[in-house]
């Protein structure tokens, strides 16, 4: 039986033999991309290159990207949903297209991995009044031995890709195209009665599982309609967990090697078996795995942004662990979760995901949250009946399962529909707020975000000049309204230090220094003094942005861009806030001046 490690390696080797270069996984918290809280797909870090930017490693790329999807947290508990997963990806940036991609995909699945061809189904775009039916993809599938009855056509809700979804929602200039999804049929799963003989790949009856998707990025939306892209791209993504389930011929992803060791520790902790306690054990295993990965990438529990979801994961896992012990309101003291977290790290021992992780810090963060939730749980128990279930959920962090059970124990009325309505109302408000929060994100490569991005490089150097060379970047976030920059430092900045940093940045802007991009080996760039945030994520050949003359530079950093061509284009910055962002980390917020306003400020 193939392990997930085997599958990951086979996938990489297969595409490397076909001219692809391996790119490292990006962090779970996207750098300089405020359009989303987490990296939720393999495509996400590749957007600038899919939109036309050149990649340092060329036109054929392959990777395994770690991903987290917060929207799937409440779905975890069945056999196929997980909040953390790995996505295998391969890309052609204006190189090969449908013929090679479809042929290679079938060869990989059937010959390299050994999946029975009779269990593999493909879906393709059915076409509409704007974009024609994808007969080309269907023809290539047939030529590669896929019978017509296992090729199913769907409309754009299933087989069209763009970042915005269906074509009507796509903004002008956005690329998109038809796609071909791959499904594995678990023949041992009986057809759902409501589908009967009409069961098909997208019916969600449990018999089929999507294991991959090839996007044929062919069109761009313009004012005059959809026009062909000058450079057609291939964007493939396939879930490793689901591929492993197919290789096992078992639709339960939690029985794969990616969960086996973790589930085993949960069984030891509870004294129960997985076969009789699947939903709770799946939640514990998934949530603690996701938590370990998020903490390793710098996320800490809090009541907002990424930290909010980490807190939800940890608290829901803790409740489920207590539930397995038979006392949902018991004191959360058992340290078994640390052993489970160790199992997570062991599961990924062959990867580089935890190469620079501080395991003691990961355990400390979880232990601290455990202690806080124990106190919160006790406080919340006193509020049962005095506040609404939604208040328990929102204010005290009670997972809905614990609230519902406590209400039933105390013979109180629990209205799930009312609770769900409150949650939906809250989520709608959050989505509305997010539109403003994420407006004009870096991935749109707009003029304003490009200015902010270059300004962070100057700010980084200025911080090191004033505070010392030990200062390093810990994260950044850019919107159309401001930049946010996190850096290592253990003391609050004084007003004089803030003024000095601001003056240095603005002086480098007024000098109108050139900004130059070069490609070179990573080791060479680092030897030359280039800085790098998450250095392990960069490939062997990197893009280096230098601010100032190449023989007398001011700032040099590894970066994917985009940047202005000279610092004078930025205008000027004003530091508007400085605060703590966690132990040993400070955070600066700054805004750009309009050039005219900036000049008046300088004169004054």
Image: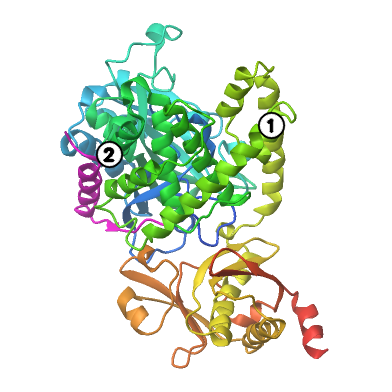
Q: Residue at x 54, y 71 (%)?
A: 487
Quadrant into which the N terminus falls? top left
Q: Earlier in the sequence, mark 1 or mark 2?
A: 2
What kind of element bears circle 1?
Answer: helix
Q: Residue at x 37, y 66 (%)?
A: 538
Residue underneath mark 2:
261
Magenta stretch encompasses residue 513: no
Question: Is 570 left or right of 27, judged from the image as shown?
Answer: right
State the extent of the magenta-drawn residues as a range: 1-28
The picture places residue 55, in percent across and down from the top left corner, at 39, 63
The picture quadrant where one finds residue 604 is bottom right
Residue underneath mark 1:
390
Q: Is residue 201 above or below residue 104?
A: above
The picture places residue 575, in percent across and down from the top left corner, at 70, 75
The picture places residue 332, in percent across and down from the top left corner, at 49, 39
What kind of element bears circle 2?
Answer: helix
Residue in the foreground of this view, choosing between 442 and 96: 442
Q: Residue at x 39, y 42 (%)?
A: 337
Local crowd size for mark 2, using a 10 Å CA cut-off: few (<14), some (14–19), many (≥20): some
Question: Is 420 left or right of 176, judged from the image as shown?
Answer: right
Residue 103 visible: yes
The picture places residue 58, in percent across and down from the top left corner, at 33, 63
């Amino acid at each position: 039986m193939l392990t997930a490690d085997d599958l990951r390696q086979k996938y990489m080797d297969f595409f490397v033999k076909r001219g692809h270069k391996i790119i490292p996984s990006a962090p779970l918290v996207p750098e300089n991309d405020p359009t989303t809280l987490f990296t939720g797909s393999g495509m996400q870090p590749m957007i600038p290159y899919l939109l036309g930017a050149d990649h340092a490693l060329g036109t054929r790329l392959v990777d395994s990207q770690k991903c987290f999807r917060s929207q799937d947290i409440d779905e975890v508990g069945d056999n196929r949903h997980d909040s953390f997963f790995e996505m295998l990806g391969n890309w052609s940036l204006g190189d090969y297209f449908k013929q090679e991609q479809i042929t290679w995909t079938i060869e990989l699945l059937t010959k390299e991995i050994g999946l029975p061809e009779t269990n593999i189904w493909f879906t393709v775009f059915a076409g509409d009044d704007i974009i024609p039916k994808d007969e080309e993809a269907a023809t290539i599938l047939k030529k590669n031995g896929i019978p017509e009855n296992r090729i199913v056509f769907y409309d754009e809700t299933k087989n069209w890709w763009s970042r915005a979804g269906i074509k009507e929602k796509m903004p002008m200039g956005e690329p998109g195209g038809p796609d071909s999804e791959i499904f594995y049929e678990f023949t041992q799963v009986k057809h759902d009665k409501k589908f009967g003989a009409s069961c098909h790949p997208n019916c969600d009856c449990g018999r089929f599982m999507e294991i991959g998707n090839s996007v044929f990025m062919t069109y761009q939306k313009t004012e005059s309609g959809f026009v062909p892209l000058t450079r057609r791209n291939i964007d493939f993504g396939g879930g490793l967990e689901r591929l492993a389930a197919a290789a096992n011929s078992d639709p339960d992803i939690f029985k794969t090697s990616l969960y086996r060791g973790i589930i085993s520790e949960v069984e030891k902790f509870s004294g129960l078996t997985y076969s009789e306690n699947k939903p709770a054990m799946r939640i514990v295993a998934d949530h603690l795995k996701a938590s370990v990965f998020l903490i390793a990438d710098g996320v800490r529990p809090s009541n907002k942004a990424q930290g909010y979801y980490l807190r939800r994961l940890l608290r829901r896992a803790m409740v489920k662990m207590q539930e397995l012990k038979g006392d949902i309101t018991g004191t959360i003291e058992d340290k078994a979760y640390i052993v489970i977290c160790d199992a997570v790290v062991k599961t990924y021992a062959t990867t580089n995901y935890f190469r620079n992780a501080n395991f003691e810090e990961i355990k400390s963060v979880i232990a601290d949250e455990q202690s806080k939730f124990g106190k919160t749980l006790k406080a919340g128990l006193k509020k049962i009946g005095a506040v609404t279930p939604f208040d328990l959920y929102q204010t005290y962090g009670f997972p809905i399962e614990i609230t519902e059970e406590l209400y039933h124990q105390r013979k109180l009325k629990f209205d799930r529909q009312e609770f769900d309505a409150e949650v939906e109302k809250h989520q709608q408000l959050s989505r509305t707020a997010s539109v403003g929060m994420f407006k004009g994100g870096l991935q749109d490569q707009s003029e304003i975000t490009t200015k902010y991005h270059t300004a962070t490089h100057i700010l980084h150097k200025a911080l090191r000049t004033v505070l010392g060379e030990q200062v390093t970047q810990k994260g950044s976030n850019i919107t159309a309204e401001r930049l946010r920059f996190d850096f290592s430092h253990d003391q609050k900045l004084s007003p004089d230090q803030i003024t000095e940093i601001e003056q240095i940045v603005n002086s480098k802007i007024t000098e109108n220094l050139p900004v130059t991009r070069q490609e070179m080996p990573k080791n060479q760039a680092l030897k030359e003094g280039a800085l790098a945030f998450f250095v392990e994520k960069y490939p062997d050949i990197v893009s280096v942005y230098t601010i100032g003359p190449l023989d007398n530079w001011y700032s040099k950093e590894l970066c994917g861009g985009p940047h202005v061509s000279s610092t004078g284009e930025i205008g000027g910055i004003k530091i508007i806030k400085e605060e703590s962002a966690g132990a040993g980390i400070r955070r600066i917020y700054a805004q750009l001046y309009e050039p005219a306003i900036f000049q008046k400020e300088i004169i004054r």
